[in-house]
């Protein structure tokens, strides 16, 4: 769980994880202003607090390094803000267990109307569709959405893809999908629901614009790298 100011939602999120489906829960507190790390410790979770705030991508780097170090075979990223339902973790990891995927994306766009029913703002849905269409064109794929925060990775994925070279902000999530495609690692989508509510953390308009532009830039870099025009370290093995 990459966490930032998640004290209010952490416990409920953790308790909703189906027992028996995890060996360890790692909470990385990205220098929150609240007591996120303390609460994680009280729940007996492995809590790591960053000495300074680095951002959502930087937070994931610590999460994955820790999971690899502890011997994880499958790693699920679960936002601690309660937007994604932990009950479907079994479905999220199944394609990896069965060997059909190294990356699983929980898609809010697979079931018609699921994103709207979950309260996803209309501008986010529109931007999501537009950016996903551009990304699909660049990658020659047909993903239903490339912007979900609910993902599962195999150990092989995290050992193959140079994720430490990625952005420390939200664009990290975009970059790993392009890397999956570039390195030829199979990606499977699983339909999920979402929930936007007052205590959930949410990206504001300005951060959304930076993220959108970063996504377009990633698509461009991917294409330029593939065409051998401008090499990009994120796609270097
Ligand atoms: N904003 C922010 N979130 C962080 C950071 N580090 C970790 N996070 C966690 O990352 C998760 C995702 O951030 P959100 O702001 O909810 O963004 P999102 O869920 O991708 O997008 P929305 O659809 O707008 O909710 C949250 O659960 C945070 O707890 C950070 O530095 N900044
Ligand atoms: Mg959120």
Image (cartoon, rainbow, N blue to C red):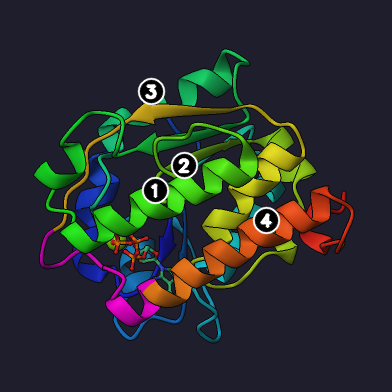
Q: What is the secondary structure assignment of the residue under circle 3?
A: helix
**Spatial CA span between label 2 and label 3:** 11 Å
Q: Which residue is mark 3?
A: 91
Q: Residue at x 36, y 62 (%)?
A: 40
* Residue designated by label 2: 151
Name the chief secondary structure element in magenta: loop
The residues tagged by marks 3 and 4 sit, at their Cα atoms, a distance apart of: 24 Å
Identify the mark nearer the N-term, 2 or 3: 3
Compared to 154, does 170 lie above or below?
below
From the image, which quarter does the N terminus lie in? bottom left
Question: What residue occupies the far top of the structure in this picture?
Answer: 98
- Position above or below: 46 against 77: below
Q: Which residues are magenta?
A: 197-208
Which of pointers 3 and 1 lies earlier in the amino acid sequence?
3
Q: Residue at x 40, y 75 (%)?
A: 209
| SS at badge 4 | helix
Q: Position of residue 173 (x, y in %)?
A: 53, 56
Q: Label 4 belongs to which residue? A: 65
Q: Was residue 128 drawn as part of the magenta stretch in this picture? A: no
Residue 148: which numbered mark, if any? Answer: 1
Between the C-alphas of marks 1 and 4, the distance is 21 Å
**Camera-nearest label, 1 or 4:** 1
Front residue of 155/193: it is 193
């Amino acid at each position: 769980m990459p966490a930032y100011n998640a004290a209010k939602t952490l416990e409920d999120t953790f308790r909703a994880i189906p027992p028996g489906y995890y060996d360890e829960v790692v909470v990385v507190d990205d220098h929150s202003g609240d007591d996120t790390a303390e609460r994680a410790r009280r729940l007996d979770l492995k809590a790591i607090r960053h000495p300074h705030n680095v951002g959502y991508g930087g937070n994931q780097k610590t999460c994955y390094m820790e999971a690899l170090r502890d011997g994880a075979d499958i790693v699920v990223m679960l936002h601690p803000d309660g937007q994604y339902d932990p009950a479907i973790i079994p479905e999220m990891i199944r394609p990896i267990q069965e060997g059909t995927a190294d990356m699983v994306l929980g898609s809010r766009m697979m079931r018609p109307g699921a994103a709207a029913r979950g309260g996803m703002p209309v501008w986010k849905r529109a931007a999501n569709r537009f950016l996903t269409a551009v990304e699909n064109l660049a990658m020659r794929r047909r993903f239903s959405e490339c912007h979900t925060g609910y993902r599962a990775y195999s150990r092989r994925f995290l050992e193959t893809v140079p994720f430490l070279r990625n952005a420390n902000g939200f664009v990290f999530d975009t970059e790993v999908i392009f890397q999956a495609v570039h390195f030829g690692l199979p990606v499977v989508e699983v339909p999920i629901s979402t929930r936007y509510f007052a205590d959930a953390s949410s990206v504001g308009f300005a951060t959304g614009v930076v993220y959108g532009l970063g996504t377009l830039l990633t698509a461009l870099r991917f294409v330029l790298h593939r065409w051998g025009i401008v090499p990009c370290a994120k796609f270097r093995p």
